[in-house]
Image (cartoon, rainbow, N blue to C red):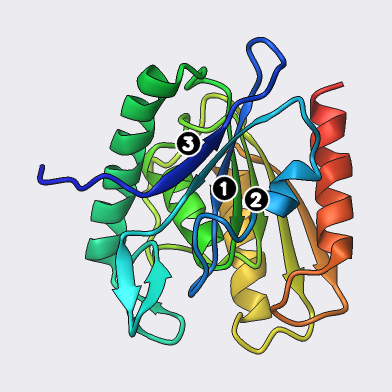
Amino acid sequence: MNYSPLTYIYKASATPNAPTLLVLHGTGADETDLIPLAKEFGEQYNILSLRGNVSEHGMPRFFKRLGMGIFDEADLTFRTEELVHFVKELAVKEIFDINKLIALGYSNGANIAGSILVLYPDFLQAAILYRPMQPFKQLPDNWKTERKTPVFASNGKMDNTIDTAGTKKYVAALQKAGFAVTHHEFATGHQLTQQDVATSIKWLGELYK
C-alpha cells in the first residue's frame, strides 16, 4: 500500500518497559495539542503524539468526512491501516513495546482509535476515548477482542454533535465484542473538561497499580 508517514512527537519515559500513550488529537489541532494532557497521566508512560495526514480546509484530521458526523469509511479504513503500519515501524525506531500501547484520543482522534479497535481489535492494550462516535455504521459480525481490552469512554450530556442513543449503541457493541468498557456521561458539551481528565487518570491508574 502507498502509505505516508505521520508527523509525530515521541517522549520516552525513564521507566523501563513503559507503556506508551498513543495521543490522537481532535479536528484542527496537531501533535502538540494534547501533550500537556498526556503528561498529567504521569512520568511512567512514554508519549507518542501523532498528527493526522488529512487536511480539511487547513485543519488537520485523521480521516476524511462527508459531512458533520458522516465519515468517509473507505478513507477511515485506509488511514487506520496507515496509522497502524506507521506505529509498528516507529516502535522499532524509537524502541518501545508495541504490545503496551494505550490510545488517548479526543473527538476525531477518539474516532480513529475506535476504528483501530474495530479493524485491529487486539492491537491496543487499552484505550481512552473522549467524545467518541461509532466509527463504522455497520460493525463486523465476527468482531471480537481476545485481549478483553479495557476502554474508557466519556461523553457530554449536552453535546449537540453526538447522538446519545448512538453512543449507548456503540458502548453496547464494544461490550458485546469483549471490550471491558467504562463509560461516563458528564454535564457538559463536546469540549474536554477536567472531569474527563481526572476520571480517566484515575481509571488508568487502577489498571496499572
* Residue 171 horizontal side relative to residue 139, left or right: right
Q: Distance between the residues labelled 2 and 3?
A: 31 Å
- Element type at marker 3? loop
The residue drawn where x is 42% and y is 42% is 143
Q: What residue type is labelled 3?
A: Lys
Q: Which of the two discs, 2 and 3, labels the residue nearer the N terminus? A: 2
The residue labelled by disc 2 is: 35
Image quadrant where residue 91 sits? top left
Classed neighbour count for the residue bearing mark 2: other residues with Cα under 10 Å, few (<14), some (14–19), many (≥20): many
In-image side of 152 versus 148 (left or right): right
Position of 52 relative to 146 (above/below) = below
Question: Where, quadrant-wise, is the C terminus in this rendering?
Answer: top right
CA distance for labels 1 and 3: 24 Å
Identify the image quadrant of residue 52: bottom left
Q: Disc 1 on helix, strand or loop?
A: strand
Q: Are marks 1 and 2 in contact (CB under 8 Å)?
A: yes
Q: Which one is earlier in the sequence, the residue at label 1 or at label 2?
A: 1
Tell me if I can see residue 64 in this picture: no
Q: Where is residue 177 in the image (x, y as percent from the top left)?
A: 54, 42
> Residue 144's mark?
3
Label 1 crowding class (10 Å Cα cut-off): few <14, some 14-19, many 20+? many
Of the residues under marks 1 and 3, which one precedes in the sequence?
1
Location of the N terminus (image quadrant): top left
Query: Which residue lies under the disc numbered 1?
Result: 23
Name the residue: 82% across, 80% down: 188
Q: How many marks?
A: 3
Tell me which corner region of the image, top left, top right, bottom left or bottom right, holds residue 201. top right
Query: Farthest residue in the top direction?
Result: 16
Looking at the image, is mark 1 or mark 3 nearer the viewer? 1
